[in-house]
Amino acid sequence: MSTILSYPAISTLTQDNLEFLSVTFPKPTRSQLIALRSVLNDQKAPWRTYARGLVSIDKDAMLKEVAFKCSPRTADSVSLLIDCGVCLQAVATTPLKIPMAGTEQISLRL
């Protein structure tokens, strides 16, 4: 039996979430975060449904697709995000500034 994750369709990341993303996806792996956001934002994915203001995600199917399209390590990072309560809908849709070099952390794009 697969686990279904449900998130509000309109979600935002907290400052704690942004800091956790920065730690989970250090600079050498930030390109994987960009690819992950693309996978999570695919509204036609069979593992993602929308009803009554909620986005529901079949966790196992989504993790398989992330492992295939990004990498198995990225799928492990997503599992860590889920375990820590980070909203995957917010990861997919929140406008982010994702620096690929330097000392800046991931932040909201204003």
Image (cartoon, rainbow, N blue to C red):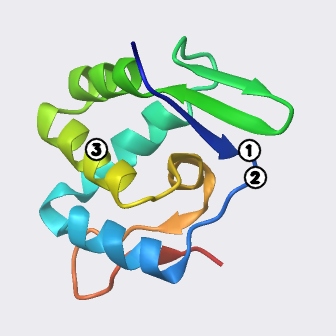
Q: Secondary structure at mark 2?
A: loop
Q: Is residue 103 left or right of residue 43?
A: left
Q: Earlier in the sequence, mark 1 or mark 3?
A: 1
Asked if labels 1 and 2 touch by Cβ distance under 8 angstroms, the answer is yes
Residue 40 in view of the camera: yes
Q: Quadrant of residue 109?
A: bottom right
Residue 32 in view of the camera: no
Question: Considering only vertical position in the picture, is 49 above or below 87?
Answer: above
In the image, which disc is placed on residue 9? 1
Q: Is residue 14 left or right of residue 61?
A: right
Residue 49 in the image, given as x and y percentages of width and height: 67, 21
| C-alpha span from label 1 to label 3 | 20 Å
Residue that badge 3 annotates: 79
What amino acid does circle 1 point to?
A: Ala
- Between 60 and 18, the residue placed more toward the observer is 60
Residue that badge 2 annotates: 10
Quadrant (top left, top right, bottom left, bottom right) of the N terminus: top left
Mark 3 neighbour density, 10 Å: few (under 14) some (14–19) many (20 or more): some
